[in-house]
Image (cartoon, rainbow, N blue to C red):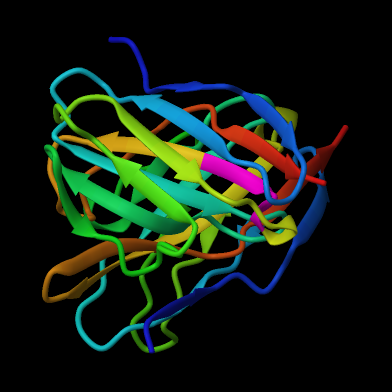
Amino acid sequence: AQRVTQPEKLLSVFKGAPVELKCNYSYSGSPELFWYVQYSRQRLQLLLRHISRESIKGFTADLNKGETSFHLKKPFAQEEDSAMYYCALPVYGGATNKLIFGTGTLLAVQP
Amino acid sequence: EAGVAQSPRYKIIEKRQSVAFWCNPISGHATLYWYQQILGQGPKLLIQFQNNGVVDDSQLPKDRFSAERLKGVDSTLKIQPAKLEDSAVYLCASSSSPDPTDTQYFGPGTRLTVL
């Protein structure tokens, strides 16, 4: 079955500490993965996609096909990074092509 | 550009009552999505429209939920009758194409509480 797993509901770190938000996937094929973010009182929005290999707001994510993971990393956390982060996997199935979201991880960056 | 608009932002109803949510997507976006997000879970797709046609409604509980996008722009999602387990945030999103790798732009959501 195609699914996305985010094992941590909450990740609390201190400002300046490294951050790693975990995402594991199950997909038969070559996946494309995304990270969406929701800051407090804001809309859910795209943070980054693995295919572009970009760094957004200091965050990067590398697709590891061997470990079926797409962890989101940042070397030095900032208080403004506090938000809900969702890993998402596009799935294709005939007429049904859709984005599957993980359950999300709340990142809390303490001062 | 203006973002995805949704109304109302909050709604409280009693079980067995009816409720409707409205969404206006980003201008020019042919693809519109309705998601249900239950507390502690990620968004789950309920229905996807391409223009005014339904692409995927496999996860929509059709005995009580209905949705339409008559003119290919605005969309309405209705629940009739509501159950306690329908309490959730209902998110509308739009994108320029039905490819799930295309960026989806989300509205602020409607928080529904069923008592």
| Viewport quadrant of the N terminus of chain B | top left
Horizontal side of B101 relative to A104 (left or right) equals: left
In the image as oriented, which residue stretches furthest toward the top? B1
Res A76 visible = no
Horizontal side of B84 relative to A91 (left or right) equals: right
Q: A68 or B58, which lies in front?
A: B58
Q: Residue A90 at x, y = what percent?
A: 29, 64
Q: Residue B39 at x, y = what percent?
A: 72, 54
Dominant secondary structure of the residues highlighted in magenta in the image: strand
> Residue B70, relative to residue B79: is it above or below?
above
Q: Residue A67 at x, y = what percent?
A: 44, 86
Res A41 visible = yes
Horizontal side of A34 relative to A84 (left or right) equals: left
Q: Residue at x 50, y 37 (%)?
A: A44
> Residue A91, relative to residue A44: is it above or below?
below
**Stretch of the chain drawn in magenta:** B86-90
In the image as oriented, which residue stretches furthest toward the right? A111
Q: How many marks?
A: 0
Q: Residue at x 75, y 31 (%)?
A: A79
Q: Residue at x 59, y 32 (%)?
A: B110
Q: Determine the image quadrant of residue B71.
A: top left
Q: Is residue B68 magenta?
A: no
Q: Residue A65 at x, y = what percent?
A: 33, 82
Q: Residue at x 15, y 35 (%)?
A: B96
> Residue A90, relative to residue A64: is it above or below?
above
Horizontal side of A48 relative to B25 (left or right) equals: right
Q: A24 or B42, which lies in front?
A: B42
